[in-house]
Image (tube, rainbow, N blue to C red):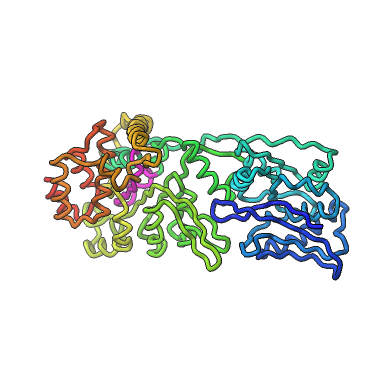
Amino acid sequence: MVARVATVAFEGVEARRVDVEVQLTGGQVCFVVVGLGDKAVAESRERVRAAFAGMGLALPSRRIVVNLAPADLPKEGSHYDLPIALVIMAAMGVIPPDSLTEWAAVGELGLDGQIAPVAGALPAAVAASSQGLGLICPEACGPEAAWVGDCRVLAPRSLISLVNHFRGTQVMSPPQPGPVLEGERVPDLRDVKGQEGAKRALEIAAAGGHNLLFVGPPGSGKSMMAQRLPGLLPPLSPAELLETSMVHSVAGLIARGALTRARPFRSPHHSASMAALTGGGLRAKPGEVSLAHHGVLFLDELPEFSAQALDSLRAPLETGEVMVARANAHVRYPARVQLVAAMNPCRCGHGGLGRGACGRAPRCIQSYQSRVSGPLMDRIDLQIEVPPVTATDLALPPPAEGTAEAAARVAKARAAQAARAEADGPNAPRLNAQAEGGYLERIASPDEAGRALLAKAADATGLTARGWTRTLRLARTIADLDGSPAVKRAHIAEALIYRRVNSEAAAMAVG
């Protein structure tokens, strides 16, 4: 007799169905697990054996063969413990053999029969629901899986309680979805004194979802302003919340099913490796750029990151996804992020102007800033100089406008973008930073004066084709903040200044 139950194998944020089969036969007494499992899967034999002993149940003195099908799909992780234990009990007659036909199962077993939480309960529930199955998962993962409303969920604390449920001696109630948290409090933009130009750039970046770079000496407020960007952004939509939570679930970052509509803000240290930023490792876990999906990735001290790590972000910033290639698999993670970075003008910190100016400028400035490759800089829409904060600025009272006022203007600009996208069709991008091709031409075609200025600036500064496209996107966002249905010369002029490509030539072209 062969008993079966479904489980899943994770490929990025997608869960592929795996059938766990067991057969008890005569011959040499042994316990074999086949199907291209990793070390954690191989060790499940001992965890299952100990969990059975904790229930007062012994494995049969027969040859036990467990097959994880399809056999050519790599299986990783400890979440195969529970389905393996269930199919063995079904083959032994401990639970009714037909009780598992409508269920998928994930969970790690403790030596005492308790079921420990595992990562990926949310995508597992989505996959089970799409196949018309319910999901059996650990009690701690029940509130997370319950967010998939059309999926039946059983969340037992221990293996014995699950056996009692299937035998009809105990009835388990379905878990309730976890809470929706407000997220951490974001500091107010009113705390930043001076830096009106940088605040304007921050507001434009928030309105259109554009990438942003602050360049300035230490203490000028670069990190302060970046940390206040999440307060300007609207909360996650239901679709965005599901996509973001799927990534966090695979990474094991959802506790007791608690979700938040606040946009992710990830700030890795500059010692982070390429795998830490883009994903990878032994089990190809999501990296920081995927954990920041639909949110902000903040890279402080940008030139201090390794060149390899920074250049690995070039493709995700264009495509909105990361492909982690391994010898036996290709794993895809979403990575639609807004990049915000900060850097000093040179290694000494102050650059070539003002008190404390670098004595080796401009060579020191060129050497330090050249650590960031030109193609990566070309993907940053707004590049703005942040001057030192003066004593006069610090002596002034707090600004009249703060996060609330700026967020209201951002929300209005984003509403205009959403309305245009809705009129164009369901596949149109909702943010200007994602507009391209014919759609961009329709929404951001400048007037004659603006087109002439853009062409003149492109000739004077060597603007690339990507730079041309990103300038149009940026000008469209500036026009949205101004409430203008058309992109005019003034909007093109401001967008060109933020590009910071050969700034002297750009200023001459604009002038």
Q: Name the side, left or right, on which 457 lies relative to 192.
A: left
Quarter of the image with the C terminus in it: top left
List x then y, in percent, for residue 262: 48, 38
List x then y, in percent, for residue 270: 43, 58
Residue at point 77%, 59% (across, down): 22
Label count reads 0
Q: Name the side, left or right, on which 316 lies relative to 435.
A: right
Q: Name the one closer to the observer, 66 or 185.
A: 66
Q: Name the one closer to the observer, 126 or 339.
A: 126
Q: Name the one closer to the observer, 213 or 35.
A: 35
Residue 283 falls inside the magenta stretch? no
Q: Is residue 357 above or below residue 327?
A: above
Q: Is residue 324 above or below residue 255?
A: below
Q: Residue furthest bottom?
A: 28
List x then y, in percent, for residue 304: 38, 60
Residue at point 34%, 34% (across, down): 423
Q: In this view, does 254 lie above or below 69?
A: above
Give the residues in magenta.
Answer: 207-226
Q: Name the one closer to the observer, 51 or 420.
A: 420
Residue at point 54%, 60% (across, down): 284
List x then y, in percent, for residue 220: 31, 46
Q: Can residue 410 be seen in this view?
A: no
Q: Which residue lies furthest to the front in this view?
A: 1
